[in-house]
Image: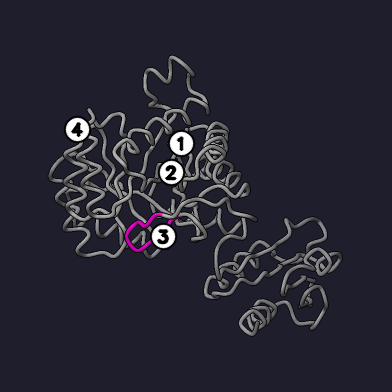
Amino acid sequence: MNRRKTRKIQVGNVTIGGDAPVAVQSMCNTDTRNAEATLAQIERLKKAGCKIVRVAVVDKDAAHAIGKIVEKTDIPIVADIHFDSRLAVEAAAAGASKIRINPGNIGDDEKVRDVVNACRARNIPIRIGVNGGSLEREILEKYGVCARGMVESAKGHVKILNRFDFDDICISVKASSAALTVDAYRMLSDELDYPLHLGVTEAGTVRIGRLKSAIGIGSLLLDGIGDTIRVSLTDDPVLEVETAYDILHALGMSENTPSLVSCPTCGRCMIDLIHIAKEVENRLSEIKKPIKVAVMGCVVNGPGEAREADIGMAGGKEMGLLFRHGEIVKKVPMNEIVDELMKMAHEI
């Protein structure tokens, strides 16, 4: 798919926008003032593949804790600020790699200028974070909660920063509705070329939150929209990272990651396909190559249905078939078929 061209910004050691890969983000749910607990969670997020981590800055102690955190991790830290410009200035001085604010709720021009100057001096970008549930009164009175209102809110915040000659900007326009989120980002992408941070905010618990995020974020990525993503779940943030990668993987946008094609089974299936498919999926996690592997329940249409796969198997009562690009290469006992399939995967 063709990515829409956006400007590039640098968030610590991660490039966002332009032709850079889509970066996965998450947010700690620890008390930022507890630097040790926050660092422990950041390490778990990093192991899961997270590239950027956001932390809440609720007071001066939280802002100062960022200094302790950035000393012990190479993950870029985003300071999430609301209402208090002094916290943004202190977080920037402490070593945050990006500041997330709404310029409209930071205060008067002098306070916005203070934040801009602190960020400019350290080459720190600012993310303008617009949420459908917290739009300005004048926007609500003119537009209500809709895509146009969210986009106009974002554009208004951009103008505030531009007024102080600051243009190192990333934007998000999130809503708890996947449909509204998609509409807002599509509209914004047509009107501005700043890098976009995608997400369906307050998506819910794992069950529904994953679905809403996949629909919202996935639809936009298919349109070529989006430079960085965060899945919002009411759960362990590590699950957010795993879900984000699942979305990228389903879209064919994750690098060096195998993909699995497997049939849903039917009355013709004479093997425990569910168990086999899960075993293959688990063992494929060891492989860092962009190969496609098919696991099919029977030989009736197995090779044909998975012709586009690099390798695959089709089960039978006692014997199964292994194939490569739809061509049968070997017949093996079913109790050996997974091992033989994995040998083929490693040989590619």
Q: Which amino acid does label 3 sit on?
A: Thr
Cα distance between the residues tagged 2 and 1: 11 Å
- Residue 14 covered by magenta stretch: yes
Quadrant position of the N terminus in the picture: bottom right
Residue drawn at x 44%, y 51% as measured from the top left? 240
Mark drawn on residue 15: 3
Name the residue at the right extreme. 300
Residue drawn at x 36%, y 48% as measured from the top left? 168
Answer with the quarter of the image where residue 254 lies. bottom right
Ranked by sequence position, the earlier of labels 1 and 3 is: 3
Q: Where is residue 284 in the image (x, y as percent from the top left)?
A: 58, 72
Residue density around tag 1, few if under 14, some if 14–19, many if 20 or more, within 10 Å: many
Which residue does the numbered mark 4 point to in the structure image? 110
- Residue 323 covered by magenta stretch: no
Ranked by sequence position, the earlier of labels 4 and 1 is: 4
Q: What stretch is highlighted in magenta?
A: 9-16
Q: Which amino acid does label 4 sit on?
A: Glu
The reply to whether callout 2 and callout 1 are in contact (CB within 8 Å) is yes
Cα distance between the residues tagged 4 and 1: 28 Å
Which residue does the numbered mark 1 point to in the structure image? 174
Q: In the figure, 109 relative to 193: above or below?
A: above
